[in-house]
Image (cartoon, rainbow, N blue to C red):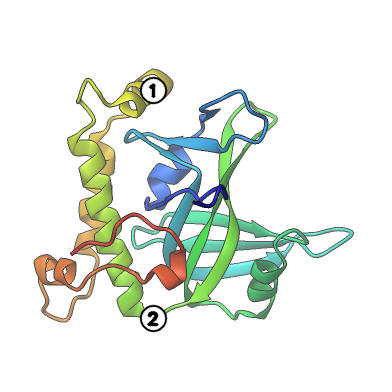
Amino acid sequence: MSGAPTREVARRTFAAEFNDASYTFKESDDERAPVYLLLPTGERANRVFVVGTLTEKEDVGEDSEYWRGRVVDPNGDTFFVYAGQYQPDAAAMLRELEAPEYVAIAGKPRTYEMDDGTVNVSLRPESITVVDESTRDRWVVETAERTLERISTFEDETNRYAAMAKEQYDRPIDSYRENAIRALESLDTDGKSNDEELSDGGVSDEADGESETPLQ
């Protein structure tokens, strides 16, 4: 068997929960151990997979190109995406894309502390792919399902990441349930029910790498 490390599962989350996450941790003292962002619904995320509308892009670099993109989810909340010389393919995509455009992004969360002590979260993309509306809609359904699954096990005493979330965050968990339901209600499904959307399956692994298991 190969000893090569496998990539972490790419978690699905809406922007509201992603932006509320501020606590990061490692599972070991190894300096090469992965850094996880703790989601408020009780899950660790070393990688995330998001699909939304690229609404703006801007080169905010001084000495070299450093692209910032705004990717908006169906609730109107924003993922901020940054790519520079260490993410050349993603930076090239941001340079070439013309907003608005549906995009799928797999990447790593990054936190940074502001002068006032607040913690902001952004996404460092590993890949950016142009997708269509139906792919965005399937991501919304899957992400809502994953969010509701996390909430359903939040009070499980064996859920260590939920216990960590309770210690680190003071936010009503029901707000994320409402966020997920609002995202589902926003979909234009052309007469299809959410159950029919669920049966369509998940977003292709070609877009997000090792993702959470697609819905069946």
> In the figure, is residue 31 to the left or right of 44?
right
> In the figure, is residue 173 to the left or right of 47?
left
Relative height, residue 189 to residue 181 (above, below): below
Quadrant of the rendered structure where residue 184 is?
bottom left
User: In terms of secondary structure, where does tag 1 sit?
Assistant: helix
Residue 113 locus on image (x, y percent): 65, 32
Q: Residues within 10 Å of mark 1 (few under 14, many from 20)?
A: some
Q: Residue furthest right?
A: 63
Relative height, residue 185 to residue 26 (above, below): below
For the C terminus, the quadrant is: bottom left
Q: Residues within 10 Å of mark 2 (few under 14, many from 20)?
A: few
Residue 63 locus on image (x, y percent): 89, 59
**Residue sitting at 40 percent across and 68 percent down?**
205
The residue where tag 1 is placed is 164
Q: Nearer the observer, disc 1 or disc 2? A: 1
Q: Which one is in front, 195 or 112?
A: 195
Q: Residue furthest front?
A: 1
Q: CA distance from mark 1 to mark 2?
A: 37 Å
**Residue sitting at 58 percent across and 39 percent down?**
120
The residue where tag 2 is placed is 132
Q: How many marks?
A: 2
Say the numbered circle drawn on residue 85: none
**Residue sitting at 21 percent across and 44 percent down?**
149
> In the figure, is residue 119 to the left or right of 192?
right
